[in-house]
């Protein structure tokens, strides 16, 4: 049965209260949500996504106060970050309380939590008395969905309903910060610029990206991937070496390479926010063309450019 497309927080709350799977809009990407305290419902999230159970989920909460019920220790920097940037594209990884099921955290003694910034989903969270466990609403390893239609195309047959909140504003997953040994550490680049975090709490530690770190599969070397081969570099130079059909994902100026089946420009005026907003839409669009390759250029390593480049590198990894 195809998922029901719904438009009100009321209808969404009733799906969740009876243990259902509901795709929810956030400012970053769509999430695939269930009652985090209902282990059977959480198990269905993993099944619907084809997600390995060693990959922990993010909890979505209604306000900073809800942290108290879920975590043992809120580091001072974590509190500063939550108060400054929530609701918003920032996830905090903190020592969990027993009430959080092990299935949610993949057996870790920490839990990832954020307060999403989308009016419909905030209204929804106000109507339920449990946090929502929600990974991005895509099959494991594929590009995250930034519209209700993307969710319907890929998971429509496996979930109960989709709460349609339009196109997501930010377009990239949240930035994830953990506190191993109490040190604020960047686990994943995302929709909140690391510069803004560092200007509030000082310099971060960085976890080297790894292909096999089970603590943060969002850091898997190959992830966020279209099914076509992604090649990074100067598109014109790459194009000159190719015989097979290809498309181009460019940052600002359109590439006038007649040989490309299509050129998708992230932001004609070179704006990083606009580029982030359009990135996954562009990858999906080019992935659907009869091409063998997607040629993509990297962006400046600053602000959201870091997160965009991170996703492009993972998309290109073999
Ligand atoms: O913007 C977002 O973060 C979206 C929306 C729906 O909120 N969610 C999202 O979830 O991107 P997901 O499951 O696709 O990515 C969550 C990442 C995973 O890579 C996971 O490994 C990491 O968060 N994570 C979750 N719990 C963790 C923990 N306790 N320690 C370290 N990493 C954790
Ligand atoms: Mg994901």
Image (cartoon, rainbow, N blue to C red):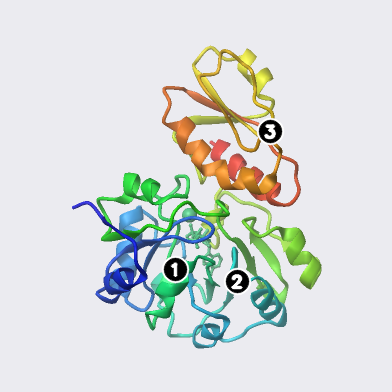
Q: Image point 55% across, 52% down: which residue? A: 212
What is the number of the mark on residue 92?
Answer: 2
Judge from the rendering whether residue 316 lies leftward or rightward of residue 179; answer left or right. left
Quickly name the residue at label 1: 121
The mark that comes first in sequence, 2 or 3, is 2
For the residues labelled 1 and 3, the Cα–Cα distance comes to 33 Å
Quickly name the residue at label 3: 252
Residue 19 drawn above or below residue 1: below
Residue 71 drawn above or below residue 194: below
- Nearer the observer, 150 or 43: 150
Image location of residue 46, percent across then percent down: 35, 60
Q: How many marks?
A: 3
- Binning the other alpha carbons within 10 Å of mark 1 as few (below 14), some (14 to 19) or many (20 upward) gives many
For the residues labelled 2 and 3, the Cα–Cα distance comes to 33 Å
Q: Image point 58% across, 60% down: which residue? A: 174
The mark that comes first in sequence, 1 or 3, is 1
On the image, which quarter does residue 137 sit in?
bottom left
Judge from the rendering whether residue 39 lies leftward or rightward of residue 82; answer left or right. left
Q: Secondary structure at mark 1?
A: helix
- Binning the other alpha carbons within 10 Å of mark 3 as few (below 14), some (14 to 19) or many (20 upward) gives some
Image location of residue 180, percent across then percent down: 66, 72
Is residue 218 visible in the rendered structure shown here?
yes
Q: Secondary structure at mark 3?
A: loop
């Amino acid at each position: 049965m195809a998922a029901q497309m719904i438009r009100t927080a009321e209808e969404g709350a009733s799906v969740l209260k009876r243990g259902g799977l509901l795709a929810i809009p956030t400012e970053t990407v769509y999430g695939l949500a269930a009652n985090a305290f209902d282990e059977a419902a959480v198990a269905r999230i993993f099944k619907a996504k084809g997600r390995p159970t060693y990959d922990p989920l993010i909890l979505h909460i209604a306000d900073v106060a809800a942290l108290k019920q879920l975590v043992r220790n809120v580091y001072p920097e974590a509190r500063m970050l939550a108060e400054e940037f929530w609701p918003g594209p920032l996830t905090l990884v903190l020592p969990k309380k027993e009430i959080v099921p092990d299935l949610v955290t993949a057996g870790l003694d920490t839990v990832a939590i954020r307060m999403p910034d989308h009016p419909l989903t905030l209204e929804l969270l106000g109507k339920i008395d449990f946090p929502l466990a929600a990974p991005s609403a895509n099959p494991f390893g594929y590009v995250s969905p930034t519209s209700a239609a993307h969710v319907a195309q890929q998971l429509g047959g496996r979930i109960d309903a989709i709460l349609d909140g339009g196109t997501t504003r930010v377009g990239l997953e949240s930035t994830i910060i953990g506190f191993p040994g109490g040190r604020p550490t960047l686990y994943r680049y995302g929709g909140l610029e690391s510069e803004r975090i560092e200007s509030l709490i000082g310099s971060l530690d960085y976890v080297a990206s790894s292909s096999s770190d089970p603590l943060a599969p969002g850091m898997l070397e190959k992830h966020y991937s279209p099914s076509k081969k992604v090649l990074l570099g100067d598109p014109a130079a790459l194009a000159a070496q190719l015989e097979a059909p290809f498309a181009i994902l460019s940052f600002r100026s359109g590439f006038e390479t007649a040989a490309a089946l299509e050129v998708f420009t992230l932001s004609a005026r070179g704006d990083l926010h606009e580029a982030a907003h359009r990135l996954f839409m562009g990858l999906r669009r080019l992935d659907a063309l009869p091409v063998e390759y997607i040629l993509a250029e990297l962006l400046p390593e600053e602000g959201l450019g870091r997160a965009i480049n991170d996703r492009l590198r993972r998309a290109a990894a073999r």
